[in-house]
Image (tube, grey):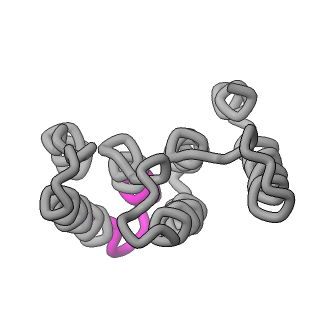
């Protein structure tokens, strides 16, 4: 909730600092009450997306996926969802960098692959709202 407050103010730096503290306390001190989840990462990714900073959003996405993949079947609390992928797509589209359209399309393809993997594992895919991400990629 505090992370979201920072994000709403546009203060991604403070939000990331708090996320880092949460990660440290959870992973080093085993403080279960402070485990970051997909919402924590996605909120900060959205803040970077609004400012057109795909490289910062991608760093967070990679950290999220690293945590997700630590469990053999994937940590469900860390599973990226349509908001997560849409944040990456939006970050690329707002960056106006050369190749940003291709990068946004690659994220959309990654989302499809992830949804297929979730179905293979017989989990409900949190990426079922793909039209939202597709529309973001087109804009």
How many labels sit on residues? 0
Across and down, in percent, residue 10 comes to: 68, 34
Magenta span has 31?
no
Left or right of residue 20: residue 56:
left
Relative image position of residue 61 (x, y in whole percent): 50, 62
Please give the name of the residue rendered at 35% of the width and 52% of the height, measured from the top-left corner.
85
Query: Viewed as shown, does residue 6 lie left or right of 42?
Result: right
Q: Main secondary structure of the magenta part?
A: helix
Q: Where residue 139 sits: x, y (%)?
A: 23, 44
In this rendering, the answer to whether 86 lies above or below 103 is: above
Quarter of the picture holding the N terminus: top right
For residue 96, what is the image quadrant?
Answer: bottom left
Residue range in magenta is: 91-101
Q: Residue at x 34, y 46 (%)?
A: 81
Residue 13: x %, y % from top left: 77, 48
Instruction: Tell me, yes or no, if residue 35 can be seen here.
Output: yes
Q: Relative to 16, is 85 on the left or the right?
A: left
Residue 6 versus residue 113 in the image, above or below: above
Please tell me which residue is depicted at 21% across the width and 38% down the height of the picture: 132
Please name whichever residue, 68 or 92, is drawn nearer the observer in this view of the structure.
Answer: 68
User: Which residue corresponds to the image point at 40% horizontal and 53% vertical from the top-left?
Assistant: 79
Q: Is residue 31 above or below residue 110?
A: above
The reply, left or right, for residue 41 in relation to residue 24 is: left
Residue 13 visible, this angle: no
């Amino acid at each position: 909730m505090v992370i979201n407050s920072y994000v709403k103010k546009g203060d991604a730096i403070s939000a990331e600092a708090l996320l880092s503290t949460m990660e440290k306390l959870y992973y080093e001190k085993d403080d279960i009450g402070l485990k970051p989840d997909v919402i924590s990462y996605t909120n900060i990714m959205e803040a970077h997306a609004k400012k057109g900073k795909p490289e910062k959003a991608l760093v967070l996405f990679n950290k999220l996926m690293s945590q997700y993949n630590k469990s053999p079947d994937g940590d469900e609390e860390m599973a990226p969802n349509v908001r997560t992928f849409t944040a990456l797509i939006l970050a690329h589209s707002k960056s106006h960098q050369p190749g940003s359209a291709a990068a946004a399309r690659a994220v959309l393809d990654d989302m499809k692959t992830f949804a297929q993997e979730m179905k293979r594992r017989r989990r409900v895919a949190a990426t079922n709202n793909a039209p939202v991400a597709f529309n973001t990629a087109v804009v």
